[in-house]
Image (spheres, helix red, strand yellow):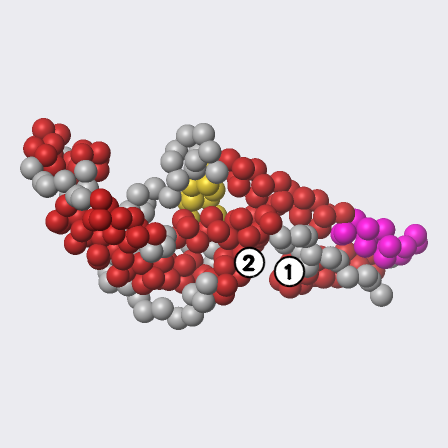
């Protein structure tokens, strides 16, 4: 299952550097094992068997986490760890049809960080195993459901403000003048209501939030040690 995630430039660079370092580490290990096991005068059949065994061992070490694999593997492993750390690694009910298909953040929530300097100016595309990706989407939906519904009720009473009204009008093909008239006709939210909205927004968890946390987790982890060969 493919995800496109907005990240900081620092996170993107750290992930790419870590993935490249892991690729090089695995290649160096494979080369060293071949130098150790491929002996002068060895038959072609025996040499082919050695190379195959080294490939099999490297693949097994990727599965166990001794090698991190490619970028998708790195993020997938970190996503599993992040789900476990948050207590979200479990079976979730299927969301209502169409609820998790819309792009972007859930209804009524702002971007997690501003675009521009220091914001989410980088993009990461990552393929997760289907079951893992489905767990991410379901966990984000059900964890956020109550807060999103409360935000919808909040917006029904106080509105989302002029900026949001204009963006939604453009998306829905509504004239901007009409959207401005509707927004202007709503009462202004008092400070207490704005604080309630902020608390509700903080309770919303998105797939992007989970994946960004997983990327931070992956790039903050020390490289696993390779065990000594017997």
How far from the left and from the top, in percent, is residue 71? Answer: 56, 48
Write the start and end of the magenta stretch as one range.
29-42
Question: Is residue 45 in sight in this rendering?
Answer: no
Q: Is residue 65 above or below residue 16?
A: below
Does residue 18 appear left or right of residue 172 in this picture? right
Tell whether label 2 touches label 1 (CB within 8 Å).
yes
Return the residue nearer the eye: 113 or 6.
Answer: 113
Residue 22 drawn at (x, y percent) = 67, 48
| Residue 64 coordinates in the image, percent (x, y) | 64, 64
- The earlier-in-sequence mark between 1 and 2 is 1
Q: Residues within 10 Å of mark 2 (few under 14, many from 20)?
A: many
Residue lying at 17% horizontally and 48% vertically, measured from the top left = 155
Q: What residue is pinned by disc 2? A: 77
* Residue on which disc 1 sits: 65
Residue 190 % position (x, y): 18, 44
Q: For numbered disc 1, what is the local secondary structure? A: loop
Residue 41, magenta (yes or no): yes
């Amino acid at each position: 299952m493919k995800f496109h995630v907005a990240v900081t430039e620092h996170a993107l660079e750290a992930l790419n550097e870590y993935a490249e370092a892991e690729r090089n580490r695995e290649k160096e290990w494979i080369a060293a094992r071949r130098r150790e096991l491929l002996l002068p005068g060895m038959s072609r059949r025996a040499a082919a068997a050695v190379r195959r065994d080294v490939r099999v061992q490297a693949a097994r070490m990727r599965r166990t986490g001794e090698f991190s694999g490619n970028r998708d593997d790195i993020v997938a492993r970190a996503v599993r760890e992040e789900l476990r750390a948050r207590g979200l690694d479990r079976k979730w009910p299927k969301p209502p049809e169409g609820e998790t298909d819309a792009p972007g953040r859930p209804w009524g929530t702002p971007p997690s960080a501003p675009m521009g300097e220091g914001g989410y100016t980088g993009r990461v595309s990552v393929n997760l195993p289907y079951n893992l990706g489905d767990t991410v989407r379901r966990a984000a939906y059900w964890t956020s459901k109550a807060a999103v519904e409360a935000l919808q009720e909040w917006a029904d009473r106080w509105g989302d403000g002029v900026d949001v009204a204009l963006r939604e009008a453009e998306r829905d093909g509504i004239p901007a003048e009409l959207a401005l008239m509707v927004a202007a006709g709503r009462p202004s939210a008092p400070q207490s209501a704005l604080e309630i909205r902020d608390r509700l927004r903080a309770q919303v968890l998105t797939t992007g939030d989970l994946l960004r946390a997983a990327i931070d987790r992956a790039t903050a982890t020390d490289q696993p040690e390779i065990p000594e060969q017997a």
